[in-house]
């Protein structure tokens, strides 16, 4: 009988661990994400799914309308701007409440925005706040003061009083020099350093959300050794977290799940559909699809496995069979989901529960525009003609048809077409191998010894192109290999691909250790500058080392234009210049995001390229009920 | 017994310290910077520098000492840290401390590991006894074949096959998450198979030996049936090697199998550990290693205690 002892011991342990981790009932809506949120601190949010969660639990001064990305009131019920576009005044609604019943006031916004401009918060988007007058100077001042404090600390050990004195000075300086002021509890005045036509779009962005000051401050303390305002993030945990959006998290388990419950104090509570939402994290893309197939999941916002291309083909079969009905509905202006919802269900070999949507981002390859390579050699890609040649020799449609296979749109520029209202369509360089070879020849690269490779005037062969990609996804490798073959064949240049682990790839890109490197960019706000500023000489994400004072001046001129329509036209001119003349990067295609959801069971998914899906607009419908309605 | 217990408990911190030191050196040698987002916007350089200083990432020796003091509870005893076993903040997950990550992940991994070990013991002992009593019989060959398959088939193959069959086709078990016993069954079964196979081989070998031994022959001579001899006399001794295997095996199963957790989307610490290594999240790596090595030592100790209880010849 002693043999049974280990069993009994294990059984006792099993009961104990089960007790530690009780199961939860099914939520009204179950969403499967591929990764967990890094943080629920809105000022530190950075990733797309995180920003989306931010918009679910917080509400900024204004909000985006997911259907067309127009601005709608949030905590502010109205606002006005001065004639020069520098002063903005927001009038807050009196019935906006935190999830603990406290009123949302202008001081919550002031506090949150000040956090974002403190270096110790380490907000990824602190740069966006620098558009507020004096904010960047304030940030730099604080950085310098902290450095001085640390230097002094090496000589004499500072006390808490010293740190407090510096903090008091910091608060004073923020009040005196940064252009944001609470005129009263429900009025905020913001002064910008330059007119910003898309300022409201920024105000709708999750990092501009307010935080509940009292609960955050419980978790901050001054560090006498460094003078820094140290913040621990205990306040973002359910139980402590106070939010002002439609939902409030009640459970958050690391890389496992988050449970959102309707915020009873939310002022527009009547509009919120699902009472509880479970966001489950399944990192394995294959398991994610299996879990959706097994039922019990309503929406997968980022479908990962490679075989999604085959699943999308099944969707195309379904749409093809109902092409007439879908076309007629589209002409009427109906949304695709509305049409599909009432069509007969898919038959064998078809499906309608997967959908590829155009996203607000562009897949590209960066050219290294620096004059020399990291080992000091002359960099042929410093010459724009060489870059143009490489760009025109790439058959993007072939890449989409044979490599990426998600039905993406070819991109010749950076701003995804149709994503920004009023922004004209800009055409970049076409696919034209004859012109490509001519460009290369004007740059002095001609095959002089008929060995199949181009040489310079001295007969030196074109240096081997170092094509860098990250091994994070086979997509990048396949794109790199296909491009290598195209360039070898069409231009006669030696190309070698170099795959690196995501982290090492990132380091190489940062150091400029590549000729051409895989890249990509998603826009943050609804203005072309979110893409175009990337090419500014001083931009922190200018991986290409592209420095052109003429372009910077063009961009400045466009940015300071008062008339919004003329401004967009000028920005389009900047983009045209970039992608017909300069070509610092080679756009491949607009990104698509693949969703899985059954349109007959889930309502509220929007197809605007910015993919602003708001959880509070999602509604699970009973399939039987909608069948009956038909 | 008390002396054994005491001396083993005194050894524990030294073993864990050795493991900590080796892991620390290895973790520090991983290239990359944990404060850098692989995707996403870059924080300004001042911020990165400030964070490096805050976490002592610019000074490995200071990091080594401070982390050890906090994790071991020494800092708490000295009054410099508010918590006794503070494994620090995760470097990659700003909102989580390593303690919180282990607290949410460990119960899941442990439940999975424990269930797997129970299944492994049941299957392993049954198959081992069936085969060991009549070596060479059809039942023996059959269980042997299964056990070879259990050891050699990788768990992502078995796991995916089980998922496809039971969850997607038959819809008997849910996928993903750990909502109840039913969601844990398939991953536990998958995780248990290699252990079950190993246990069955240990038991089978022990049974063959025991059934041929003198005391088994004596028991049979006294008129006991083959079944009684097998279950009451032979199994007890044949089980001893299983017991010594059980310590490290349970520790290994409980601290999570990366593959099984990935395939079944079980949010346990096995996954977290591998991801932490890839992201160079040093504090999280160190924390999980510390917990794992402590568990391993404690389980081995438990097994040794049980060993003495089952087999009084070992004093």
Image (spheres, coloured by chain):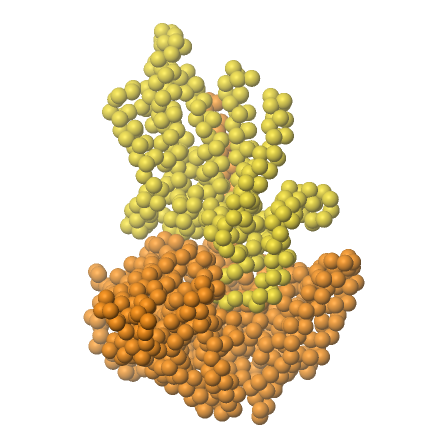
Q: In which quarter of the image is residue B181?
A: top left
Q: Which of B14 and A105 is in front in this view?
A: B14
Q: In this view, does B237 lie above or below A483?
A: above
Question: In percent of the image, x 41 and y 31: which residue is there?
Answer: B121
- Chain B painted colour: yellow
Question: In percent of the image, x 30 and y 45: which residue is there?
Answer: B161
Q: Nearer the viewer, residue A241 or A396?
A: A396
Instruction: List x then y, in percent, for residue B22.
Output: 54, 40
Q: In which quarter of the image is residue A481?
A: bottom left
Instruction: List x then y, in percent, for residue B134.
Output: 29, 19
Question: In percent of the image, x 39 and y 79: which residue is there?
Answer: A582
Question: In percent of the image, x 58 and y 79: which residue is there?
Answer: A131
Q: Quadrant of residue A447?
A: bottom left
Chain painted orange: A
Q: Along the horizontal axis of the image, is B221 left or right of A351?
A: right
Q: Along the horizontal axis of the image, is B143 left or right of A574?
A: left
Instruction: List x then y, in percent, for residue B243.
Output: 46, 26
């Amino acid at each position: 009988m002693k043999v049974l002892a280990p069993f009994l011991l294990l059984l006792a342990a099993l009961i104990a661990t089960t007790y530690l981790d009780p199961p939860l009932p099914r939520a009204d809506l179950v969403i499967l994400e591929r990764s967990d949120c890094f943080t629920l601190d809105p000022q530190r949010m950075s990733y797309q799914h995180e920003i989306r969660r931010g918009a679910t639990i917080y509400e900024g001064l204004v909000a985006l309308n997911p259907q067309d990305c127009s601005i709608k009131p949030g905590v502010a019920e109205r606002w006005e701007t001065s004639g020069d576009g520098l002063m903005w005044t927001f009038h807050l609604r009196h019935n906006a409440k935190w999830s603990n019943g406290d009123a949302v006031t202008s001081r919550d916004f002031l506090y949150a925005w000040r956090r974002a401009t403190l270096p110790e918060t380490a907000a990824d988007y602190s740069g966006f706040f620098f558009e507020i007058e004096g904010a960047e100077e304030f940030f730099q001042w604080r950085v310098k003061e902290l450095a001085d404090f640390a230097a002094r600390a090496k000589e004499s050990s500072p006390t808490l009083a010293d740190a407090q004195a510096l903090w008091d000075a910091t608060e004073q300086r923020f009040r005196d020099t940064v252009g944001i002021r609470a005129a009263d509890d429900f009025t905020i005045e913001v002064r910008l350093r330059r007119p910003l036509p898309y300022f409201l779009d920024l105000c709708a962005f999750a990092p501009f959300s307010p935080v509940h000051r009292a609960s955050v401050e419980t978790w901050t303390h001054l560090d006498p050794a460094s003078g820094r305002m140290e913040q621990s993030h205990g306040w973002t945990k359910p139980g402590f977290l106070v939010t002002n959006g439609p939902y409030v998290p009640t459970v958050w388990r690391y890389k496992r799940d988050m449970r959102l419950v309707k915020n009873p104090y939310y002022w527009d509570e009547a509009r919120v559909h699902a009472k509880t939402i479970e966001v489950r994290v399944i990192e394995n893309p294959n398991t994610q699809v299996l879990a959706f197939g097994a039922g019990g999941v309503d929406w997968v916002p980022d479908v990962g496995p490679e075989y999604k291309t085959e699943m999308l083909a099944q969707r195309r079969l379904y749409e093809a069979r109902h092409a007439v009905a879908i076309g007629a509905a589209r002409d009427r202006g109906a949304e695709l989901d509305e049409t599909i919802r009432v069509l007969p269900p898919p038959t064998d070999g078809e499906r309608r529960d997967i959908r590829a949507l155009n996203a607000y981002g562009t897949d590209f390859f960066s050219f290294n525009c620096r004059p020399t390579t990291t080992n000091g050699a002359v960099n042929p890609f410093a010459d724009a003609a060489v870059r143009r040649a490489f760009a025109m020799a790439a058959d993007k449609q072939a890449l989409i048809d044979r490599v990426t296979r998600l039905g993406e749109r070819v991109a010749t520029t950076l701003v995804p077409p149709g994503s920004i209202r009023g922004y004209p369509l800009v055409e970049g360089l076409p696919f034209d191998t004859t012109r490509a070879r001519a460009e290369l020849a004007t740059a002095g690269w001609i095959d002089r010894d008929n060995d199949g490779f181009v040489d310079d005037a001295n007969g030196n062969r074109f240096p081997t192109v170092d094509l860098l990609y990250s091994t994070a996804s086979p997509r990048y490798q396949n794109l790199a290999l296909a491009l290598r073959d195209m360039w070898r064949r069409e231009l006669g240049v030696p190309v070698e691909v170099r795959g690196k682990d995501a982290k090492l790839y990132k380091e190489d890109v940062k150091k400029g250790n590549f000729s051409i490197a895989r890249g990509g960019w998603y826009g943050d706000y609804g203005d072309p500058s979110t893409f175009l500023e990337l090419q500014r000489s001083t931009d922190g994400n200018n991986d290409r080392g592209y420095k052109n004072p003429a372009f910077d001046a063009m961009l400045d001129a466009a940015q300071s234009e008062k008339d919004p329509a003329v401004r967009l036209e000028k920005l389009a001119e900047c983009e045209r210049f970039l992608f017909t003349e300069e070509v610092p990067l080679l756009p491949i295609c607009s990104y698509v995001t693949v969703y899985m959801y059954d349109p007959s069971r889930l309502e509220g998914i929007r197809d605007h390229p910015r993919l602003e899906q708001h959880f509070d607009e999602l509604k699970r419908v009973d399939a039987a009920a909608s069948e009956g309605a038909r | 017994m008390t002396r054994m217990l005491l001396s083993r408990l005194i050894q524990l911190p030294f073993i864990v310290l050795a493991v900590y030191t080796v892991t620390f050196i290895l973790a520090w040698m991983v290239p990359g910077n944990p404060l850098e987002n692989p995707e996403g916007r870059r924080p300004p350089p001042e911020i990165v520098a400030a964070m490096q200083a805050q976490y002592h990432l610019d000074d490995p020796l200071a990091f080594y000492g401070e982390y050890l003091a906090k994790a071991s509870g020494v800092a708490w005893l000295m009054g410099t840290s508010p918590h006794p076993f503070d494994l620090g903040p995760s470097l990659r997950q700003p909102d989580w401390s390593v303690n919180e990550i282990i607290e949410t992940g460990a119960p899941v991994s442990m439940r999975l590991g424990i269930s797997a070990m129970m299944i492994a013991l049941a299957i392993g002992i049954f198959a081992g006894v069936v085969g060991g009593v009549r070596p060479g019989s059809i039942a023996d060959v059959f269980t042997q074949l299964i056990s070879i398959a259990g050891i050699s088939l990788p768990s992502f193959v078995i796991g995916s096959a089980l998922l496809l069959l039971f969850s997607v086709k038959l819809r008997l078990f849910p996928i993903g998450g750990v909502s109840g016993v039913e969601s844990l069954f398939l991953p536990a079964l998958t995780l248990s198979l290699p252990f079950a196979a190993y246990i069955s081989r240990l038991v089978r070998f022990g049974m063959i030996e025991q059934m041929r031994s003198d005391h088994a022959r004596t028991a049979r001579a006294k008129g006991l049936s083959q079944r009684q001899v097998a279950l009451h006399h032979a199994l007890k001794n044949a089980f001893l090697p299983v017991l010594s295997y059980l310590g490290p095996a349970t520790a290994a199963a409980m601290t999570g199998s990366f593959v099984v957790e990935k395939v079944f989307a079980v949010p346990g610490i096995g996954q977290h550990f591998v991801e932490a290594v890839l992201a160079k999240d040093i504090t999280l790596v160190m924390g999980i290693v510390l917990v794992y090595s402590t568990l391993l030592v404690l389980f081995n100790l438990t097994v040794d205690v049980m060993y003495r209880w089952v087999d009084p010849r070992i004093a």
